[in-house]
Image: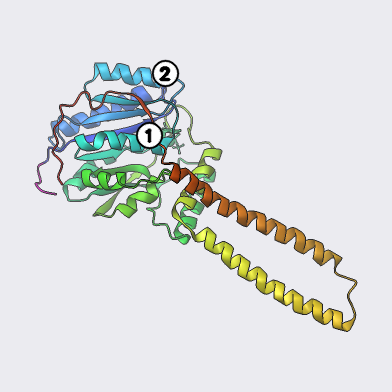
Amino acid sequence: MSSIKQNKKLTVIVPCYNEEEVLPETVKELSNILDSLIKSKQIDSQSRLLFVNDGSKDDTWNLIENYSHELPHVTGIKFSRNFGHQDALLAGMTVAVNYSDMIITIDADLQDDINAIPKMVAAYYNGYDVVYGVRNNRDTDTAFKRGTAMAFYGLMRRLGVDMVPNSADYRLLSKRATKALLAFKERNLFLRGMVPLVGFPSTKVYYARKERFAGTSKYPLKKMIKFAFDGITSFSTVPIRLIMNLGILLVVVGIGLFVYTLMQKLRGAVITGWASLMTSIWVIGGVQLICISVIGEYIGKIFIEVKQRPRYTIEQENYTESFEYKDNSDD
Ligand code: UDP
Ligand code: MG
């Protein structure tokens, strides 16, 4: 970081999928935070909110548009359809990075305490490029969500994926960290695994996670499982190695069984064995199917990556319009 001038531009990126119920409150609260940071000269007056409408089927985009006419610091991106939370964050960063010195991503439902924002900004001025928002309690989450989340973090750690436990997609990234993140060209996005790979000085800001104050979760169990599975298979090849170990184990067991049957035959006791035969057919058949499907999962990922499809399509956008282009990049 070159100069410690406390008038850097901040863009707060908010992905929104059917969030009409929470949006008015979210706009109000985030605007207040932005205002107070601008007034206390901690961020530039050009700082803004960027709502990414991820193909909502409700009134979300109309609300964003109306707010953006009313309030100059409110801007929006409209996806042509639903692409998913991670892609919405990425689109926001791609659009905002050239106009911002730092970006913060936060969910629309304000479950993540917005009072951590000034702390994140302060950490940025202290020289940190990445500031993770970390929940110091999950009391408001259901026991089920807490349990599955913990199991997931434990599994990821064991699979060798470096993640900051209890941090979701609430974080600050400096301009150079954002650019570094955007240089990751993969289509299977798992941002919370990717950010630690970027490097740069990082720190954590703790906050208490709240209840979603309106609307329902846009992450039903099915989406959660898909997200976790994607996270694992996009980041770790340990499952492939596990299959190999399993294969070796089966071969060893097989050799043992062979020796055993041979001995039984020499003893003349061979008619038995229907049960073990049936069992092995089923077990081995099952194991093979599992193994093939895991490999298939990786091949599927390769298939998706080689296609190099665009990660999202923007239908409408008023973030860059409202900026006079000024490239003040640090690098
Ligand atoms: N979201 C999105 N696209 C989707 C699903 C969710 O942009 O397909 C957004 C959603 O609007 C919210 C954030 O991602 O801002 C997190 O979703 P939610 O709060 O429903 O997840 P939870 O907190 O229940 O895990
Ligand atoms: Mg939420």
Taking the spot 84% from the left edge, 79% from the top edge, the residue there is 264
Residue 144 image offset from top left, x and y in percent? 54, 45
Residue 163 image offset from top left, x and y in percent? 39, 54
Q: Amino acid at mark 1?
A: Ala
Q: Amino acid at mark 2?
A: Asp
* Residue 146 in view: no
Taking the spot 51% from the left edge, 53% from the top edge, the residue there is 151
Residue closer to the observer: 213 or 22: 22
| Left or right placement of residue 319 versus residue 83 in this view | left
* Residue 263 in view: yes
Quadrant of the rendered structure where residue 201 is? bottom left
| Left or right placement of residue 299 versus residue 125 in this view | right
Residue closer to the observer: 150 or 233: 233
Q: Nearer the viewer, mark 2 or mark 1?
A: 1
Rendered position, 282 above or below 75: below
Q: Residue furthest front?
A: 307
Badge 2 or badge 1: first in the primary sequence: 2
Q: Which residues are magenta?
A: 1-5
**Disc 1: which residue:** 88
Quadrant of the rendered structure where residue 207 is? top left
Main secondary structure along the magenta-highlighted residues:
loop
Residue closer to the observer: 145 or 11: 11
Whether the residue carrying mark 1 lies under 8 Å from ligand 1 is answered with yes
Q: Which mark is residue 59?
A: 2
Q: Badge 1 local density, few (<14 within 10 Å), some, or many (20+)?
A: many
Q: Quick check: which quadrant has ligand 1?
A: top left
Residue 139 image offset from top left, x and y in percent? 45, 44
Is 105 colored magenta in this rendering? Answer: no
